[in-house]
Amino acid sequence: MKIIHTDALVLGGGLAGLRTAIGMKKRGHEVISLSLVPPKRSHSSAAQGGMQASLANSVKGIGDNEDLHFVDTIKGSDWGADQQVVRMFVDTAPKAVRELAAWGVPWNRIEKGDQQSVIDGKKVILTEPENAHGLITARNFGGTQKWRTCYVADGTGHSMLYTMSNQAIANDIPVHERMEALSLIHDGKQCFGAIARNLISGELVVYIAKVTCIATGGFGRIYRSSTNAVINEGIGAALALETGIASLGNMEAVQFHPTAIFPAGILVTEGCRGDGGLLLDVNLHRFMADYEPEKKELASRDVVSRWMETHIAKGYGVKSRFGEHLWLDIRLLGEHHINTKLREVKEICQYFLGIDPVKDLIPVRPAQHYSMGGVRTNHKGQSPSLLGLYSCGEAACWDMHGFNRLGGNSVAETVVAGMIVGEYMADFLDSNACDINISTALITDFYEKEKNKLAAFYQESNTENPFEIMSEMQNIMTKNVAIFRNKTKLVEAIEQLKALRIRAKNIRVHSNAKGTNPELVAAYRVQKMLKLSLCTTYGALQREESRGAHSREDFPLRDDKRWLNRTLATWPCEQDELPTLQYEPINIKAMEMPPSWRGYGAKDRIDHPDTAIRLEEVEKIKKENNICKDSISKGIAAKDIEAQDKEILQTKLMPYKHLLPEKLRGKNARLSDEQ
Ligand SMILES: Cc1cc2nc3c(=O)[nH]c(=O)nc-3n(C[C@H](O)[C@H](O)[C@H](O)COP(=O)(O)OP(=O)(O)OC[C@H]3O[C@@H](n4cnc5c(N)ncnc54)[C@H](O)[C@@H]3O)c2cc1C
C-alpha cells in the first residue's frame, strides 16, 4: 500500500485548486494537488468571455464599484446567494485581477480616444479617456449595470490558467496528474485525505493530509447536452456526498447557457451578445426585445434560455435535421472585431459547423453549462459538518451564485475563493485542530473498500454495460430535469434513475487492463454520477417554486415565504435510495438587500413577511446615515466623506469585512480616486 503524506491535499488542478494551493504554500505548508488531466488542460481553460471585477477603468465602467457588483450578483442569484459571501467576493475580485496582471495575464487594455462599439444593435463610438490608456479594459457581460468583465480576447480562462499553473510551478507545488480521488478518508468527524487511483498504472494510492480541499469543478456531464468538458463529471462532489456527513448545497440549481452551438453543444461565449450580437428566430426577427424590452439579449442566462425555449415552443424555431434551434448573429460586429476579440468563436464555428460567423448566422440552443450547487461550505470554504474538509470553485456551494450565476462571476470566484480559502486552510494548518492521529486500521479499511469495489466489477455473473447506463442517465437528465421542470417529469426521472442505480450495482467490466481502462473508469464514475443526478432531481422535485435557473411549470412563482432557503443533500447510507434533504434557512433580517424584483424576468412572487420589515429597517438605517457630514467642517474632502459614509452605511446594514482574511481587507483603488 503506497502512502503519501502531505500537509494539504487539493483535489483539482483548475483555477480554484491551484490558487488555493499557492496560498497555503506561500504560508509555508506542503501541498500536493491531484488532477485527472495535466492542470493546464483543466476545464477552466475553456472559459472564453471573461472575469468580473469592478475596476471602473473604461468609459462604460466609470462609477462602478463593489456596491454595483454586489447588487448585480444578488439579483442574478434571485436572492438565493449568501449576501455576506457575495460582499467578500466583490471586494476581493479587483485584487484578484490585479494579482493575475502582476503574474502575467495579458488582459486586454484600454486604448485612449474614439473606439467603435456595438450597443443594442447599433454602431456607436465610445471615447476612452486619456488617463485610462493602458489600464485593464472590460466588456459588457452578464447583464451588469456597468461594463466590468475583464478579458483576454475570448481566451480568458486559457490565459488565466496558464499563468496560474506557471505560478504553481514557480512555487514548487507538485501536481500529481492523471490521479483520480475515489474516496475521502475520514472517521465520521474529520477528514484525513483521500484514496486515489493512478489512471495510467491503475495503482491505488493513499494520500494522508491534515487538510483536504475539493476543487474538482462542476458536474455538467450528468446531462447529455452540456458545454462542459468530458472530465466534468462531479466526482469531487460525489466524494463529499459519499462520506455521509458532508452535505451538497442546491444541487437542483443548474444553469443552462443560451448560446451553445447546435447540435454539438460547444459554447460560444456570452461575450458575443455582450459585444453586440443579437438573437434571431426563423423569420430573422430579434425576439428578445419582445420578451425583455429593457435588457433584451443581456438579461440573465436563466431568463434568456427560458425565452428561447418558449419561442421555439411557439413555432419560431429554425428546423434542421437535428431538431430546432435559433440564430446568433454577430455579423454586425465586423471582421476586425471578430478576428481579434472573438477569434475562438470564429474557430469553433469554422471547425465544428463549417461556417464563418463574419458572414453567417450561428445556430444556437441552450445547453447545460454551470453547476451552482456543490459541496456546501461556510464563508471560509470549510464543510460545516466534516472537520478538515474544504471546497472551492465550481465544485463548491460557497454560495455566491444562489440559483443563477452571472457571466464572468465564475472564473472570478475560482481565483477569489482560492485566495480566501487558501488562507483559511493555512490558518487551520497553523492551529491545533490538525494534529491528526490517524490509525493504520482506518487507512487500511478505506483502501480495502476501494479495492473491493473495483474488484466487484469483474464478477462474471454481472451483466450491465457502464456506458449504456451513463448514456441513459444523461438522456433522462436532459429530457426531464432541464430548463422547464414539473412534478410529472421529475417523478418519472427519479423512478428511472433509481432503476439505473440498481442496474449500476450489476456492472460488468470486461477489460482487465490494469492501467488505462476507460470501461472501469466509466463503471465507478457512473455509480457516483447517479447519486448526483438523484440529488439534483429530488431537490428539484421538492422545491415547489421557480427561482433563478430552477423553473417549475407547476409552481411558476418565486416563493420567498416557503422557499427562501438552501437545499442540503446528504447520503447517510450507501443502501439509501434517495438523498436525505434538509433546508438551511436564509435570514432576510440579516440581508443587506432584501428580496425584490430582479429587473428582468417574472415580476410576480410570493413575499416573505420579513421582507417588508427588513425593507423598512434598511430605509431607516439609510436615512440615519449622516454620520460623517459634520466632518466637512474639519476640512475633509467631500468625496472622502462620501466614501466614508458609504462604508459606514454598508457596515451597519451587513458587516462582512471581519469575515475576510486580514491581508485581503484593503480598499480597492480606482482611477476616480485620483480625480
Ligand atoms: C465552455 C465554458 C466557458 C466558460 N466561460 C466562462 C467565462 O467566460 N467566465 C466565467 O466566469 N466562467 C466561465 N465558465 C465557467 C468557468 O470556466 C468554470 O466555472 C471554472 O473555470 C471552474 O474552475 P474550477 O477550478 O472550479 O474547476 P476546473 O477548472 O473544472 O478544474 C477541476 C479540476 O479538478 C480535477 N478533478 C476533477 N475530478 C477529480 C478527481 N476525482 N480527482 C482528482 N482531480 C479531479 C480536474 O482534473 C481539474 O484539474 C465557462 C464554462 C464553460 C463550460
Image (cartoon, grey):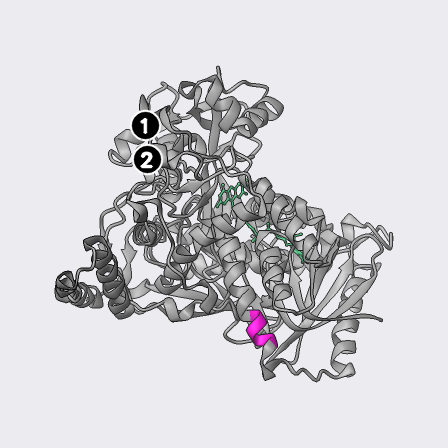
- Whether residue 563 sits left or right of residue 462 in the image: it is left
Q: Residue at x 82, y 50 (%)?
A: 516
- Decide which of 268, 652 is in the foreground and name it: 652
**Number of residues whose C-alpha sits closer than 10 Å to that of mark 2, classed few (under 14), some (14–19) or many (20 or more):** some
**Of all residues shown, which one is farthest toward the top?**
359
Q: Which residue is mark 1?
A: 127
Q: Is residue 285 left or right of residue 530?
A: left
Q: From what the image shows, is residue 205 above or below residue 331? A: below
Residue 613 seen from this side: yes
Q: Which mark is residue 59?
A: 2
Give the residue at x 47% y 29%.
Answer: 364
Question: Element under label 1?
Answer: strand
Residue 571 can be seen, yes or no: no
Q: How many marks?
A: 2
Spatial separation of the CA atoms under disc 2 and disc 1? 7 Å
When asked about the image quadrant of residue 315, the answer is top left
**In the rendering, which numbered label is found on residue 248?**
none
Instruction: Specify the amino acid type for callout 2.
Output: Val
In the displayed structure, does residue 462 sit left or right of residue 335?
right
Question: CB under 8 Å between callouts 2 and 1?
Answer: yes
Q: Residue furthest right?
A: 513
Residue 227 x, y percent position in the rendering: 55, 40
Residue 8, position as x, y percentages in the image: 66, 69
Quadrant of the rendered image containing residue 539: bottom left
Image position of 32 (left or right of 215): right
Report the span colored magenta: 425-429
Badge 1 density bin: few <14, some 14–19, many ≥20, Cα 10 Å: some
- In front of the other: 6 or 295: 6
Element type where label 2 sits in the image: helix
